[in-house]
Amino acid sequence: MKKIFLLSLFLGLAGSVYALEKIDITTGVYMESENHNATYKDSDVTVHGIRLNLNAKDYPIWTEFVYEYRNANSLSGHQGDADRYKFMLGSYFSLGDFYFKPTYELRITDVRESSLKTTDHRFQPNWDYKFNDQWSLFNGWLFGLRVDKDYRGYSETKSWDDYFHELETGVKYKFASDQNVSFSLYNEYVKNEKSDRQFRAYKFEDWQLRIAYQKMFDNGISISPFMRYSVSSKSKYADGIDGDHNGTARYGVKIGYAADNGIGVSGETYFQDKPEKRNIGSDKAHKDRFFFKLGLDYKF
């Protein structure tokens, strides 16, 4: 019932806003599938999403609403199933050769059959700088505060304040108007608040080298193979059993298609191999992952 109500709300809002000639409207649906090797098979996830994007024509501002249903394949049933809501507000403007694209996102995840409810406040002060017609600097930054309402070893559910960030800085070289290659350095950091259930209190940090190539064709198709490699990736737990994931590698490709009639298709697939070494006890098997995403958009 909740999904039907949410879909009706989105469609009603889209129909109302469509009458406003000053706004570009894009609606879309997508599906994601994440599959692991046999050791981690109970953590497979499928996500179905619907989105509505509103972009003002006369002002540098946009907003987007997203609903996702997360289906988790677990040995204990569907305790990982969740409803996720995303509300985003962004802008874009330039000062000379500097380009700014700040975004704020409120993300709410409600895990079914569980007391866990997560609220993320995500701030993205993204900016680029154009050196010349061929070289440019890009920065994709994310700073987040996560409030988890969950049971973490105490007798009652409490709220926990956790911090995370994802920082990517790199350079892009344009061969021609339809080809470019990018090189970047990426850092991810997560710090969960302590609890007496030690495995729930941890720090995670990952440093990656990334490279991607993009080719755009005259028929509206674009293709972008990419590679990501973790030069340093560690998990530190309060109980002293730390993890080492150095050498995590991801190989994949993104595709896109934009038609003249407003229809757009996007896709992504990759394979990732993640070592699972521990400083105490025997190492775990590598956590292999296969990911696939397919999306369909329509711009009014």
Image (cartoon, grey):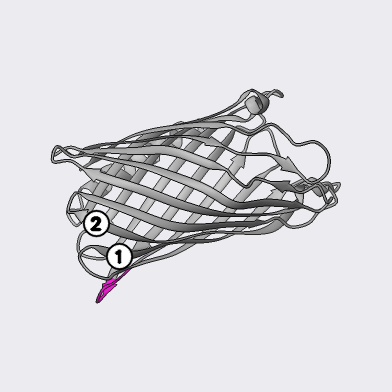
Labelled pair 1, 2 in contact (Cβ < 8 Å): yes
Question: Which mark, residue 136?
Answer: 1
Q: Which residues are magenta?
A: 94-99
The amino acid marked with disc number 1 is: Ser
Above or below, 91 relative to 32: below
Q: Is residue 183 left or right of residue 17?
A: right
Residue 98 colored in magenta in the image: yes
Secondary element at image label 1: strand
Q: Position of residue 290 (x, y in %)?
A: 50, 30
233 or 118, nearer to the observer: 233
Q: Is residue 108 left or right of residue 117?
A: left
Secondary element at image label 2: strand
| Lower position in the chain sequence, tag 1 or tag 2 | 1
Q: Dot 1, crowdedness within 10 Å: few (<14), some or many (≥20)?
A: some
Query: Which quadrant of the figure has residue 116?
Result: top right
146 or 35, nearer to the observer: 35
Which residue matches tag 2?
174
Q: Is residue 102 left or right of residue 34?
A: left
Label total for image: 2
Report how far apart the C-alphas of labels 1 and 2 lie in the structure: 9 Å
The amino acid marked with disc number 2 is: Lys
Query: For the point 26% across and 73% down, which residue is it?
Result: 97
Query: For the point 64% across and 23% down, which residue is it?
Result: 38
Question: Which mark, residue 273?
Answer: none
